[in-house]
Amino acid sequence: MHLKRRIVSAFFENPFLEADAPALALRCDSDLKALRTALSDLCRCGVLRHEAERYCFEPEAGVYGEVVALAGMHWEEEARQQVVALETLARMLEALVRQASETGAGDERMAAVAELKAMRMCHQTAHVLCDCVRTGAHPAWRATAAGALGYHGAAAAFPELQKALLVQAREEPDLVVAKAIAFALRDTQEALALLDHGQVGVATEAVLGATLSEVGWTAFLARFFDGVDGEVEALMLRRIQAEEEAVVRVVSFLLTADFPEGRADPTLRVFRLFGALPQPALFAALVGVEGEIRRTYKEIWPGIHRWERKRALMEIFEDRVRRDGASEALLEALLERTVEDEGFCDRYLRFVRSLLRTLDAEGADVVLGRVERIADGISREEVARLAEFLVALAQAVPATGLRVQKALGRWEAILPGVQVKAFHARLGAG
């Protein structure tokens, strides 16, 4: 009778279903022989019709009411079984969580942890564990349930859990549990909402677990500029440093974000943020936004326009390089840009000089050697740009003047004499 109820229920739920016996056996999880017997009885009773090896739902007159009753019996039995299964699952998981918590004993605890790790995280399991986080009588049980959710990425897989977990994280009085809930929310946007949590441990867990999508980056950086605890800020900077697309995201944010009058001056935070980013990539990003700025001219920072915002960021970058020293990679990027971009030195002469002033005599010699090697394999126009760069170097680091003049002298055969004389004259003026 149970098999017949299952078959009738399948056809009643989907009256368009037509299938042969093997397909129905698979659908109903039944032995083929038993299924054929049940199908034969249902055809004889006028519930199904059998034609060309296929069965379809065509109940005879007066039979439909019995079909409804039979399907209803199956649903009631199925619902009862589901409730029993859910209650059994809940009892099993609650016991496992208690055993895996810090209240569990030794080896038994680690065995329970291993079992929770190995468990397949289905929808029902995730919801039962979420209930444990909300209602567990002992903080250790709530923390363990949250940890299991985080390990399996359940909040990301089942988004309906996220709001309940976030509410619980804000209301949870126990710090360890609140941190575990932040861990449970890892790889979700909701974790970003915990960046401003009053407990440093919870906020740092949110920093580690937040998803940095386009929206995530904006929220993450906005929170950084709102101001956070020193420990949280340090971790945020390390997280930013580890992200491959950090430079592009940071520069884009700084060029477009709104910093209201009432908010603290962002300069110092920009300075610290720039210290976490690679100098060559940051240089390229700041220089590369020029075309975008030409297209969009609007007021963003208080009292200054977008061109001036870029200039302000360049100045902060210069200050950062003066503080940290120019890396070899930055100097290499500066040379490449000079050679490739006609007019770069003219547009950014003050910026180039400022960066070059960070060099000591030894560093300047290294740059000179690199310039001389580059000049051997490039066009006359590119050599002319390098000559501009050398003039800037001599003006920034006077000790290099003699060597720069010698280098320019060696380029007489490449550059028109009048150009070289002009460079020499500028060296004397510098």
Image (spheres, rainbow, N blue to C red):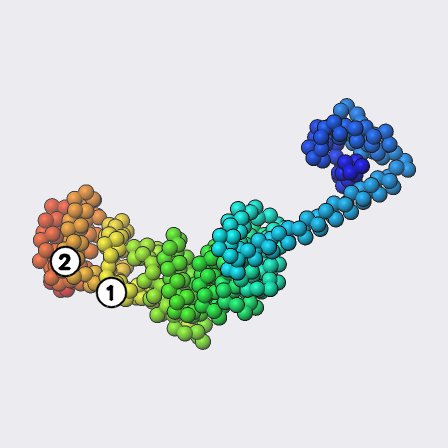
**Residue drawn at x 57%, y 53% as measured from the top left:** 96
Measured in 3D between alpha carbons, the distance from the residue under mark 1 to the one under mark 2, in whole angstroms, is 16 Å
Q: Quadrant of residue 220?
A: bottom left
Do the residues bearing badges 1 and 2 touch, measured as CB atoms within 8 Å? no
Given residues 274 and 153, the one toward you in this image is 153
Q: Is 428 above or below relative to 126?
A: below
| Amino acid at pointer 2 | Glu
| Apparent side of residue 409 relative to residue 382 in the rendered image (left or right) | left
Q: Name the image quarter holding the N terminus.
A: top right
**Dot 2 corresponds to which residue?**
362
Place of residue 294 in the rendered image (x, y in percent of width and height, measured from the top left)? 39, 59
Given residues 172 and 239, the one toward you in this image is 172
Q: Name the image quarter holding the C terminus.
A: bottom left
Q: Give the mark nearest the N terminus, 1 or 2.
A: 1
The local crowd at label 2, few if under 14, some if 14 to 19, many if 20 or more residues have their Cα within 10 Å, is: few
Residue 289 in view, yes or no:
no
Place of residue 317 in the rendered image (x, y in percent of width and height, measured from the top left)? 30, 63
Q: Is 26 above or below relative to 138?
A: above
The local crowd at label 1, few if under 14, some if 14 to 19, many if 20 or more residues have their Cα within 10 Å, is: some
Label ID, residue 322: 1
| Amino acid at pointer 1 | Arg
**Residue drawn at x 51%, y 57% as measured from the top left:** 105
Given residues 271 and 348, the one toward you in this image is 271
